[in-house]
């Protein structure tokens, strides 16, 4: 401590320019550094002898491995680095040299409680977020995930930016013409003009003229921030359950507050008081109509709702007794909405015991059970015929407005389900125009997206015989599968282009490969000695190419090799 203080004072006192130089050196360090690997039988003493006799301007900074002869070296100036590396490479004791370079940091949010949100990493989001963190589609559509639940804390600090706000029905009569929507116009395309909530048109007996405030003519006045079907308003009861579900889907990520949702950005459409069958049917119709209007107006009206979460149900119930409810899943599905529903929070076989809505027959419905941190079935329903997918739910951590901190544990299938509903929202934001074009042109084909999500999950031994897919959600895996929509290739690895050849500084290799597997990139010299190697992931949603720094190579002929699985391809190139 004392020594350090003395050093600091002395350097401040009579060498203030050195302090400046010191900071500059830190910034420059990496540009002067390179890693050296010695041949197997050599160690630090041989390296020290070599450096002191022939490379006095080079310093040995650190030993990088106790088991391999790897050292970090630094030249006096950055412009000397390449020449020094080349000269060292010509020495008998040196196996290879490569520049020390900065690595790209994985994208992870700065939310203080993210560290305890184990469910997020479990479903591959730490990798998926490098590709997208949500918000809009490649075509600019604002992505909306609907939630049907008990109620919400609309003012929660970590949700306030991510609630859906309906631009087509703000408070009051937006165009002040005294009619629902525009006077004399069927704004919502349902065949009725300026109708009220009962479908009565002006002039009909009992017509309710207060619906002039229903600017989008959907039968609800000022449904600006979702809908409470019980009251016909957008005023929601303050509830914990719905807030937690919404938080998992879309608590604002990377805002330095609280937690993150599966989506850092998304619009959550809150529908509250979904507590009776009538509420559920009305809510589902409301959601379906909004998306239908979006589809039919080319995005001018309505909302681009892609999924809907319902973490509730009726145990020991069968579809025959709930036909109008079950029918809603196909009605919404044909407009492009996938529904995600929860199975009961008890270890029952719902195939035998019955459960609504899990047992409703629809290709657009994903029934979700809950797993714990070890990927074992939590206390949750199962059924190889009717449960599609598992998602992490036990001890999930998210928004909870009832607790003083505003956050807490939210366990069970209710927590598992919104991971899936949220994932659907996130998937719509992948940087792949072909994907979004396809599902906008063919909204009713969205059942195939459900299939891809369910089958690209991590296959679990623990789910054997318990669900249809035997998988647990993995959003990154799904993104890999969806990359096939836009340029991802599933063939054997192949080098399609190599340039420039001869190369001076940087060699570019274009290739096609299986996006699901790692790629080994290696450079060999003419004697078959490996000069450089690296392992890379397929560059998802980018041009499949890799660039190699060739500055360190001495002039001559080399081979570049790309390998994946058991297949290897190599091409020769020249260093000029
Ligand atoms: Ca109208
Ligand atoms: Ca209005
Ligand atoms: Ca309205
Ligand atoms: Ca947050």
Image (cartoon, grey):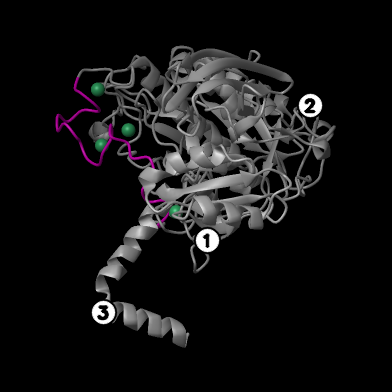
Q: Distance between the residues labelled 1 and 2?
A: 36 Å
- In the displayed structure, does residue 353 sit left or right of residue 62? right
- Residue at x-position 64% and y-position 20%: 363
Residue 276 seen in the figure: no
Residue range (magenta):
157-183
Q: Mark 3 sits on what residue?
A: 14
**Beta carbon of the mark 2 residue lies under 8 A of ligand 4:** no
- Residue at x-position 79% and y-position 46%: 376
Sequence-wise, which precedes: disc 1 or disc 2? Answer: 2
Q: Is mark 2 on a helix, strand or loop?
A: loop
Sequence-wise, which precedes: disc 3 or disc 1? Answer: 3
Q: Mark 1 sits on what residue?
A: 407
**Is 385 above or below relative to 265?**
above
- Which of 156 and 293 lies nearest the eye of the viewer? 156
Residue 317 seen in the figure: yes
Q: Residue furthest left?
A: 176
Q: Which residue lies furthest to the front in this view?
A: 53
Badge nearest the viewer, 2 or 3: 3
- In the displayed structure, does residue 136 sit left or right of residue 435? left
- In the displayed structure, does residue 467 sit left or right of residue 416? right
Badge nearest the viewer, 1 or 2: 1
Sequence-wise, which precedes: disc 2 or disc 3? Answer: 3
Residue 166 belongs to magenta span: yes
Q: Quadrant of residue 65?
A: bottom right
Q: Mark 2 sits on what residue?
A: 385
Which of the four quarters of the rendered structure image does ligand 4 lie in?
bottom left
Mark 2 Cα shell of 10 Å, populated few (<14), some (14-19), many (≥20): some
Residue 112 belongs to magenta span: no
The x, y position of residue 244, in whole percent, is 54, 52
């Amino acid at each position: 401590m004392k020594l350090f203080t003395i050093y600091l004072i002395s350097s401040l006192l009579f060498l203030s320019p050195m302090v400046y130089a010191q900071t500059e050196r830190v910034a420059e360090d990496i540009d002067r550094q390179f890693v050296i690997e010695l041949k197997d039988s050599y160690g630090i003493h041989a390296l020290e002898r070599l450096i002191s006799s022939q490379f006095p301007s080079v310093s040995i900074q650190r030993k990088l491995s106790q088991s391999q002869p790897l050292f970090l070296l630094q030249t006096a100036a950055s412009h000397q680095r390449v020449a020094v590396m080349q000269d060292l490479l010509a020495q008998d004791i040196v196996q290879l040299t490569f520049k020390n370079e900065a690595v790209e940091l994985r994208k992870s949010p700065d939310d203080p409680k993210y560290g305890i949100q184990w469910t997020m990493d479990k479903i591959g989001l730490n990798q998926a977020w490098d590709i997208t963190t949500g918000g809009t589609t490649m075509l600019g559509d604002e992505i909306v995930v609907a939630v049907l639940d008990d109620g919400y804390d609309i003012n929660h600090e970590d949700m306030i930016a991510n609630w859906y706000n309906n631009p087509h029905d703000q408070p009051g009569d937006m165009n002040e013409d005294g009619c629902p929507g525009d006077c004399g116009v069927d704004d919502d395309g349902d065949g009725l003009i300026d109708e009220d909530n009962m479908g009565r048109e002006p002039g009909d007996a009992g017509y309710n003229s207060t619906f002039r405030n229903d600017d989008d003519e959907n039968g609800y006045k000022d449904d600006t921030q979702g809908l409470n079907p019980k009251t016909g308003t957008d005023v929601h009861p303050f509830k914990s359950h719905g807030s937690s579900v919404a938080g998992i889907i879309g608590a604002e990520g990377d805002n330095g507050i609280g937690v993150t949702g599966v989506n850092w950005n998304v619009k959550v459409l809150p529908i509250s008081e979904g507590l009776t069958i009538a509420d559920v049917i009305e809510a589902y119709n409301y959601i379906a109509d909004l998306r239908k209007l979006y589809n039919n107006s080319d995005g001018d009206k309505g909302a681009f709702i892609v999924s809907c979460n319902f973490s509730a149900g009726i145990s020991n119930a069968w579809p025959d007794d709930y036909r109008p409810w079950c029918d809603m899943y196909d009605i919404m599905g044909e407009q492009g909405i996938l529904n995600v529903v929860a199975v009961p929070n008890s270890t029952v076989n719902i195939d035998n015991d019955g459960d609504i809505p899990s047992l409703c027959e629809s290709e657009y419905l994903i029934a979700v059970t809950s797993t714990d941190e070890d990927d074992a079935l939590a206390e949750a329903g199962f059924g190889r015929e009717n449960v599609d997918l598992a998602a992490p739910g036990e001890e999930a951590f998210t928004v909870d407005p009832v607790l003083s901190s505003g956050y807490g544990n939210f366990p069970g299938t209710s927590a598992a389900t919104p991971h899936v509903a949220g994932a659907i929202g996130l998937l719509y934001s992948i940087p792949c125009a072909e994907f979004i074009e396809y599902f906008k042109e063919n909204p009713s084909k969205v059942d195939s997206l459900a299939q891809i999500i369910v089958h690209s999950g991590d296959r679990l031994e623990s789910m054997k015989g318990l669900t249809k897919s035997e998988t647990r959600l993995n959003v990154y895996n799904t993104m890999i599968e969806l990359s096939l929509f836009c340029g991802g290739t599933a063939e054997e690895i192949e080098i399609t282009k190599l340039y420039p050849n001869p190369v001076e500084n940087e060699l570019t290799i274009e290739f096609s490969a299986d996006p699901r597997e790692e790629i080994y990139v290696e450079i060999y010299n003419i004697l078959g000695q490996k000069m450089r190697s690296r392992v890379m992931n397929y560059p998802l949603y980018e041009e499949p190419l890799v660039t190699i720094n060739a500055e360190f190579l001495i002039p001559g002929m080399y081979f570049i090799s790309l390998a994946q699985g058991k297949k290897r391809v190599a091409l020769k190139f020249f260093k000029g």
